[in-house]
Image (tube, grey):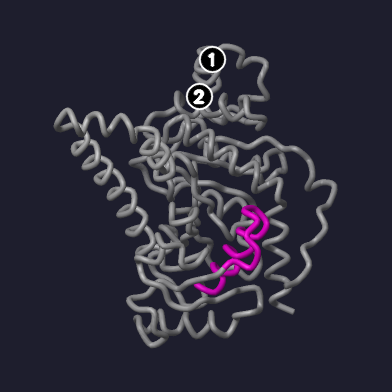
Amino acid sequence: MTAEPPVAAADRRVLPVALDAMGGDHGAPPNVEGAVLAARAGVSVLLVGDRVKLHAELGKHAGSAALPIEVVEATDVIGMDEHASDVRRRTQASINVATRLVKDGRASAAVSMGHSGATMASALLTLGRIGGVERPAILTHLPARGGFTTLLDVGANADVKAAYYAQWARLASVYLRVVEDRENPTVGLLSIGEEDHKGSALVLEAHALLREQHGRGINFHGNVEGRDIFRNTTDIVVTDGFTGNVVLKLAEGEAKVLFGWVKEALSGSLKTKLGGLLVRGALRGLADRMDPSTYGASLLIGVRGLAFIGHGSADARAVKNALLRAARAHESNLIPRLEAAFQDQAR
């Protein structure tokens, strides 16, 4: 493993996180509340959006005037039902203003609970790609036995090339080392069987590339199946964005159904209701682990700046955790370390 690059003085600056405060299904209220919660936890925030609306929303939170929160004007917002391509011409859209703040060095990261396609397009157009990365991927965490499994891509690229898998494996490996303190994380390739010869032609080609790079910044375990994601068989699972998005939505939907069944089972007879009271604390902890709000937002990894994409239905807790996660990634000096990893590979 190559040594991590030294952290330059400029990289140690405490920069605020830019939040697209108008994005999402519910607009400003959960974004502002989440920003207030994050600011109380020590993260400085730039609220990007309609100045009047954001100040009015801030006024609903006692003591917010004393918090490290600043409002940055953006006169437009790309709605959830609009086209991602609109980012090219709507320069004053809140997501574009947020990514420009990162580009200009005024913010450490951009976070949006708004239009995911627009967020990806804006980040890619404004920040560009890390050298050696052909396409960025969306990286997320799924709760698994003993912690979580990192899955990518979960929606940025439906059509992929085999080379992308190896690039994403390297990106995720660096991310887990420097942000999550996982030394030499293992990588699994999602397939229909553990055997090396199982999978589509694309998966077989990707398997060969990953095997070739094993020990060169990638600790390749081999093929994994869908069930392995939740067993935490490997720290990282790589797949195409179409499959990854299906896995993500299936996991979230199944969690809700399972908890619905548990609630029904514990609300029948008097005996089951008493049992429900006894296990309520344990179930609440389990629910927290499986709640997407716990992880806040997913990282668009591979662009030359930090950009996080959350759920459109995100609540204040999700926004808060997304901001905390973005701040932690910046403090870990993630982008320079990702760039260094690909420079080392090219030598």
- Identify the residue at the far left of this view: 269
Decide: marks 1, 2 in contact (CB < 8 A)?
Answer: yes
Q: Quadrant of residue 342?
A: bottom right
Q: Residue at x 53, y 46 (%)?
A: 308
Screen quadrant of the C terminus: bottom right
Q: Which amino acid does label 2 sit on?
A: Glu
Q: Quadrant of residue 228?
A: bottom left
Q: Residue 178: horizontal and vertical position, in percent?
A: 68, 57
Of residues 118 and 214, which is closer to you in this image?
214
Q: Distance between the residues labelled 1 and 2?
A: 8 Å
Q: Residue 320: horizontal and vertical position, in percent?
A: 53, 33
* Dot label at residue 299: none
Q: Which residue is drawn at 58% across and 39% down?
A: 98
- Residue 120 belongs to the span the image colors magenta: no
- Return the disc, 1 or 2, that comes first in the chain's sequence: 2
Residue 333 placement, left or right of 167: right
Count up the numbered dots: 2
Residue carrying label 2: 33
Q: Is mark 1 on a helix, strand or loop?
A: loop
Q: Residue 321: horizontal and vertical position, in percent?
A: 53, 37
Q: Residue 346: horizontal and vertical position, in percent?
A: 70, 77
Q: Is residue 219 above or below residue 309?
A: below
Screen quadrant of the N terminus: bottom right
Prevailing secondary structure of the magenta residues? helix
* Dot label at residue 61: 1
Q: Which amino acid does label 1 sit on?
A: His
* Neighbours of disc 2 within 10 Å: few (<14), some (14-19), many (20+): many
Q: Which residue is drawn at 46% across and 43% down?
A: 310
- Identify the residue at the far bottom of this view: 197
